[in-house]
Image (cartoon, helix red, strand yellow):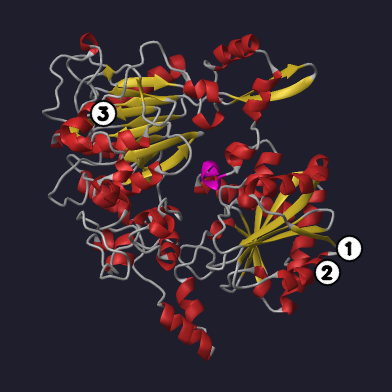
Amino acid sequence: MANSFKGLGRAVSDMFSANTMNKWNKILEHCSGIRLFTYNGLSVSVMAPPRVLLCGDVLGRLNQLVKRVNSVNKSAGPFDALLCVGQFFPDEPDRLDELMDYVEGRAQIPLPTYFIGDYGVGAPKVLSAVSRNSANQGFKMDGFKVCDNLYWLKGSGKFTLHGLSVAYLSGRQSSNGQQFGTYSQDDIDTLRAFAEEPGIVDFFLSNEWPSGVTNRATPSDIPAGISDSSGNDSTVTQLVAEIKPRYHIAGTKGVFYAREPYSNVDVVHVTRFLGLASVGNKEKQKFLHALSPTPSSAMSSDEISAKPSNTTLTPYTLVDQMDHPKEATKRAGDNELDSQYWRYDVSNKRQKHGNGDANKVCFKFISSGTCPRGENCYFPHDADAREQFLRGVCLDFIIKGKCEKGPDCNFKHSLQDDSESNSQKRSGSSNSNANRSKECWFCLSSPTVESHLVTSIGENFYCALAKGPLVPDHVLIIPVEHLPNTLSLPEDCELELGKLQNSLKMYYKNQGKKAVFFEWISKRGTHANLQAVPVPSSKVAVLKDIFTLAAEKLGFEFVTKKFNNNSEGRKWLRTQFDKNVSCFYVGLPDGSILVHLVEENEKFPAQFGREVVAGLLNMADRADWRNCSISKEEETKLAENFKKRFQVFDPNQ
């Protein structure tokens, strides 16, 4: 949906000639953050590309790395982040104290640093403690915090870093079942599921080089002594051929190698491979490399498809032909590699679900909510398993009933038994909600609730700042009771909800803004939240049109009605609501309510409301809340400031 709206960068590029934009691009290459300039009396903001440092094997030599980073940051910075590939921990015990100085806070890392080489001396001890930290429970694809400015990218995943899409595979290939330092089949499956999602991956991080990366490269550019005999991984080859990133960064070889860009199959953009040397290597090979790429989400189609004159064909076709000579002409989705999507399917023989394969479910569906095979999938699309997965339950526990990682696993090892839950509902028992609240992110009694974001608590509802807010003062109104939507509460609760909505309207009005309220109600939803987003008064007039336009682009029409007050609108909403189907509705400042009941097989984006408002505000890059994450300290400060400003309007004070 974010693609349906032109972002700020596109608006700027449409405004200027190519020559003018080239000049600005050259200027912005040396800048960081947002820059303001005036064109024909109009003030325009331009987001400069993020500046990122890439590093090879650190090997515990953090003093040397930090010294070099500080020097580069001073002379060519400031840089936004440092990404480390290859072995991060020491290769000998003598350097463990140096590493621990940073881990234990006696020395400081100068900028946010992310690593995937979770092996070496001291790794099990340090990372075990990190895994047990309560702050690192649940999904942390953007890194487990080790200490200030140091984050461990565990297993595999994909996250957004300053607008850049970053995918990674942590550890190395191994069959000895080590807890740290190796990746699993789960990690591979997860990356393959991400590869099927729309959008371009900007960075792919792996520790080991992909087998065959030097195929079709200029021989004179290949570092001496490089071969596939060690430090190369055929699994990484398969993954990078599927992910097709713009940049692939790897370590472990001890040399620097910037391969010519190569073209990919089925996509227009090229991939650049960078192999980085280790910190402090005796051969003085380059271990630190700086890049400032424009995120693919902000690039035009011409920019994405541009191919440098030295572009080669993909190096991995040759590897495919050597490994599968009879299958070289087939697409991966048509041969035995197809099993990448079907968890625990280790044989070429597949059975339709219901024929003895009940313990195997479609991993693609669980991880992303969709599956390219649809009804022709060989394995069940288990919606209940997906719901548990989204609530942070361990995938192994969901499917196999156990997890080999035990207490060291960062995911939850408990489910709500459906049959028990239904029985309790029929008997009127409240144990169901009590059990769920232990796992729910929004239940105030849950150990996982983000209590520092809570700003006001009433009898039936409480307010909290949104995590990863679209704009400042983005608020969630949440039922205290564990309920799937705000429309299923007793009617006498509506009075309290109305007071909260009116108080937020007055608060926003005091700032020259208007309130937009929207709620996504999934029939498999867990805990409701009604979102309130402030919009500048100058943009209110086009709100209805832009929601209508967005609906047309998705192929549906809203049922619309205008009311004189909030109470009448909520009563009408209850008449439209059907608990057996999913639904989305939005309440606009002029009293209009737009509602859409989602059909059974309809694909509807859960973040639709946020994406539409983000487009209206020229904030397409903030449509995904994960792009807007900030530290807990910053969240706490925002919440405290909001409470002070909102206090005079708060009906619960």
Distance of mark 3 from mark 2, alpha carbons? 64 Å
- The label on residue 317 is 3
Left/right placement of residue 610 relative to residue 104 reads right
Question: Label 3 amino acid?
Answer: Thr
For the residues labelled 1 and 2, say whether their Cβ atoms are less than 8 Å apart.
yes
Observer able to see residue 138: no
What percent of the width, then of the height, locates residue 303? 52, 21
The residue that disc 2 covers is: 568
Question: What's drawn in magenta, residue-wise?
Answer: 624-629
What residue appears at the point 83 percent right and 58 percent down from the top-left corner?
591
In which image quadrant can residue 171 be found?
Answer: top left
Main secondary structure found in the magenta portion = helix
The residue that disc 1 covers is: 564
What percent of the width, then of the height, locates residue 212? 21, 26
Residue depth check, mark 3 versus mark 2: number of the one nearer the observer = 3
Distance of mark 1 from mark 3, alpha carbons? 65 Å
Towards the viewer: 356 or 363: 356
